[in-house]
């Protein structure tokens, strides 16, 4: 993240938006279960809210400094793992749910985003759920990402991409600011997604 973006995502104002709008909309009607993976918490304002809602939370963060700072701040209430979510160091079928909040556009390519989706299928249990939100592309959004990786999701193609990764029961909708997605790992034998 560029410095302006990092400051925004660390701010109390962003924490308020996350708590009042993003997480409630993303998780409306979703049951995440007892062991949840958060992908890309960044400074962890989403993690702060999730750890009070869930029995067990693991946060995977690719940025070493952000992962270290988050682990120090949340202590033992959250397992913070410094790792690349396109190559998760977790066993298959471990998690009951996975969440992603306004971070997928920081994954460098659509192909790597798809690999991340496939990894989530791998580490989610049969019947496990994915829920998330990402920002819609636009002029203000691009201005915030000058000098950043910025690969916005296309809401019109997202359902097919999630389906292609091995998810089922995919639902994608949007408001004026963001796209919301929900999906499930098919019940039954082990997941269909693969990692490379």
Image: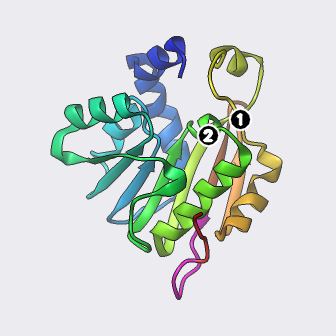
Q: Is residue 51 left or right of residue 107?
A: left
Q: Which residue is mark 1?
A: 151
Residue 184 in magenta? yes
Which numbered marker is on residue 113? none
| Residue farthest along the left direction in this orientation | 76
Give residue 162's position: percent from left, percent from top. Answer: 69, 61
Q: Which residues are magenta?
A: 183-191
Q: Nearer the viewer, residue 16 or 64?
A: 64
Instruction: Answer whether labels 2 and 1 touch (C-beta < 8 Å).
Output: yes
Identify the element where label 2 is drawn: loop
| Quadrant housing the C terminus | bottom right
Q: Which residue is mark 2?
A: 107
| Residue farthest along the right direction in this orientation | 156
Mark closer to the chain start, 2 or 1: 2
Identify the element where label 1 is drawn: loop
Q: Is residue 102 left or right of residue 64?
A: right
Q: Residue at x 46, y 67 (%)?
A: 123
Give residue 94's position: percent from left, percent from top. Answer: 38, 70
Q: Is residue 79 left or right of residue 88?
A: left
Count neighbours of disc 2 (C-alpha within 10 A) and say few if under 14, some if 14 to 19, many if 20 or more.
many
Q: Residue at x 33, y 52 (%)?
A: 58
Residue 179 appears in the picture as rendered: yes
Could you give the CA–CA distance between mark 2 and mark 1, rounded to whole angstroms?
Answer: 7 Å
Quadrant in the rendering for residue 33: bottom left
Number of callouts in the render?
A: 2
| Residue farthest along the bottom direction in this orientation | 189
Q: Residue at x 54, y 82 (%)?
A: 187
Give residue 1's position: percent from left, percent from top. Answer: 53, 23
Residue 182 appears in the picture as rendered: no
Secondary structure mostly seen in magenta is: loop
């Amino acid at each position: 993240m560029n410095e302006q973006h990092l400051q925004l995502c660390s701010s109390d104002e962003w924490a308020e938006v996350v708590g009042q709008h993003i997480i409630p909309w993303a998780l409306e009607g979703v049951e995440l279960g007892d062991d949840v993976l958060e992908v890309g918490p960044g400074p962890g304002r989403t993690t702060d809210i999730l750890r009070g809602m869930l029995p067990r939370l693991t946060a995977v963060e690719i940025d070493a400094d952000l992962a270290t700072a988050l682990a120090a701040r949340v202590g033992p209430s959250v397992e913070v793992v410094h790792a690349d979510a396109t190559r998760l160091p977790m066993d298959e079928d471990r998690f009951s749910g996975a969440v992603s909040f306004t971070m997928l556009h920081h994954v460098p390519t659509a192909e790597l985003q798809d690999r991340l989706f496939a990894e989530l299928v791998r580490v989610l249990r049969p019947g496990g759920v994915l829920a998330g939100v990402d920002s819609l592309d636009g002029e203000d959004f691009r201005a915030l990402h000058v000098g950043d990786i910025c690969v916005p999701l296309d809401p019109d193609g997202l359902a097919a991409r999630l389906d292609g990764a091995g998810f089922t029961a995919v639902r994608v909708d949007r408001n004026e600011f963001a796209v919301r997605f929900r999906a499930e790992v098919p019940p039954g034998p082990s997941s269909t997604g693969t990692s490379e």
